[in-house]
Image (cartoon, rainbow, N blue to C red):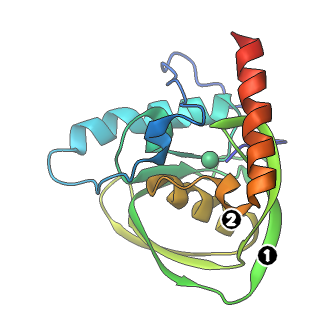
Amino acid sequence: MRGMANLPIPTSDIPLLPVLIAPHARLRAKARAVGKGDEDAVRAIIPRMFATMYTAPGIGLAAPQVDLGLRLLIVDLMPNDKPAPFTMINPEIVALSPELATREEGCLSLPGMYADVTRPARVKVRYLDETGARKELEAENLLSACVQHEIDHLDGVLFVDYLSILKRNMIMRKLAKEQKLKK
Ligand code: NI
């Protein structure tokens, strides 16, 4: 998810990763679970994902956005401009609140595009952290929206999928036009 007021952290000489831009087909693929044999790839990409996210700046990034089809995501809302990083491997939503909340979302794969998205207000997620330890997180507010947004990426879902077809098409056309101008 795109950040708005975050300060980018100096990420020195970690090479950044190119972020796939919608409507790239691989943003629509379902990522597979991280398993045995993926440890090296995961360990290598996590610092590069953080460097890429902080530089953007963003508050969340999922592995498929950097063209790695694994169920891995990172989040850092930088509360009070201090790092508070989460790494989630094979995250699973175990509960969603019946109450909904609407907030503006953006995405590093849809640069410059924002729209109000309505989702369950609270989420409970189980995942493995970067050390392989089992974790559970109950989130509300921005963290809840961000975690749901990033987990969606693992299933090939983008925030524009929650909008009306009319609004989605408008955003996709605008994005295509701006990307064309950038080339
Ligand atoms: Ni996103």
Q: Nearer the viewer, residue 20 or 78?
A: 20
Amino acid on which disc 2 is placed: Ala
**Image quadrant in which you'd find residue 157:** bottom right
Q: Is residue 75 left or right of residue 120?
A: left
Q: Which residue in the protein does label 1 denote? A: 101
**Image quadrant in which you'd find residue 46:** top left
The percent position of residue 56, horizontal first and vertical second, equals: 68, 30
Mark 2, residues whose alpha carbon is within 10 Å: few (<14), some, or many (≥20)? many
The percent position of residue 97, horizontal first and vertical second, equals: 65, 87
**Image quadrant in which you'd find residue 182:** top right
Q: Is mark 2 within 8 Å of ligand 1?
A: no
**Mark 1 or 2, nearer chain start:** 1
Q: Which residue in the protein does label 2 denote? A: 145
User: Dividing the image into 4 quarters, which one contains the C terminus?
Assistant: top right
Please tell me whether residue 131 is drawn above or below residue 68 in the rendered image: below
| Residue at the top extreme, as displayed | 183
Amino acid on which disc 1 is placed: Ala
Q: Is residue 90 left or right of residue 78?
A: left
